[in-house]
Image (cartoon, helix red, strand yellow):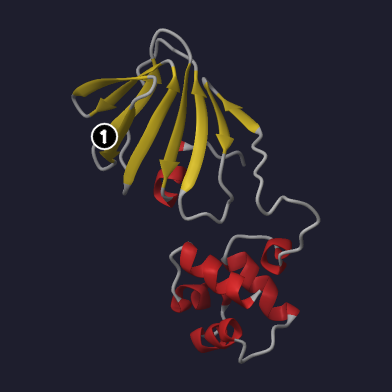
Amino acid sequence: MRTRLRSLRTTLGLSLDDVAARTHLSPSTISRIETGKRTISLDVLLPLARALQIDLDTLLDVRASDDDVVIRPEPDACGNRTTWMLSRPTAATVAVKQRIEPTDEVPRQRVHPGHDWFFVLSGTIRLWLGDREVTVAAGEAAEFATMTPHAIAAVDGPAELIMLFDRDGHRAHVPHRR
């Protein structure tokens, strides 16, 4: 579990100080836990799990099946898009499959830190990058800096994409149910 704790922390791009601020533990305490120089108790495990945004079972690696390897995405429909999360909540890079139905509305362009990348599995996508309109067909991919205003839409029928985001891109592009 100590190795998993350090791995999760570094995968999420968190320093010892970052986790310390989220848990109200000292950075040296967290370091001693990760290196095995301090015993782990429940009063430390719960804040660590919360700080890493995982449940206690994930941190403790309680496995009853192959769920630690296999991801079984569930569709989440929102407006004209259906999204399947293809990566775990703790992943540094977020993989998503999305089906976009065509609409007459031109989507609002947005900006956020990072880069976006997508691969069109089927259909055709129109990508707006500021004043530019780019058509991306099935079998093609697009990658661009996201500080340029951008939006996507399906053209002449449904389109399916695989998208990769960092955490900023995920927050900007994938609808979150509350």
Does residue 49 appear to the left or right of 130 in the view shown?
Answer: right
Residue found at the far bottom of this picture: 37
Residue found at the far right of this picture: 64
- Residue 47, position as x, y percentages in the image: 64, 72
Residue picked out by circle 1: 149
Vertical side of 77 occupied by 61: above or below = below
Residue at 68 percent across and 61 percent down: it is 58
Asked which quadrant contains residue 149, the reply is: top left
The quadrant of the picture occupied by the C terminus is top right
Characterize the local packing of mark 1: few (<14), some (14-19) or many (20 or more) Cα atoms within 10 angstroms. some
Asked which quadrant contains residue 140, the reply is: top left
User: Is any part of residue 108 visible from this angle?
Assistant: no
Q: Nearer the viewer, residue 73 or 101?
A: 73
Residue at 46 percent across and 44 percent down: it is 170
Vertical side of 16 occupied by 165: above or below = above
- Residue 17, position as x, y percentages in the image: 45, 78
Does residue 145 appear to the left or right of 83 in the view shown?
Answer: left
Q: Nearer the viewer, residue 162 or 103?
A: 162
- Residue 11, position as x, y percentages in the image: 48, 63
Does residue 30 appear to the left or right of 17 in the view shown?
Answer: right
The quadrant of the picture occupied by the N terminus is bottom right
User: Is any part of residue 42 visible from this angle?
Assistant: yes
Q: Give the amino acid at mark 1.
A: Pro
Q: Nearer the viewer, residue 117 or 130?
A: 117
Q: Helix, strand, or loop for circle 1?
A: loop
Residue found at the far top of this picture: 156
Q: Nearer the viewer, residue 120 or 145?
A: 120
Does residue 60 appear to the left or right of 12 in the view shown?
Answer: right
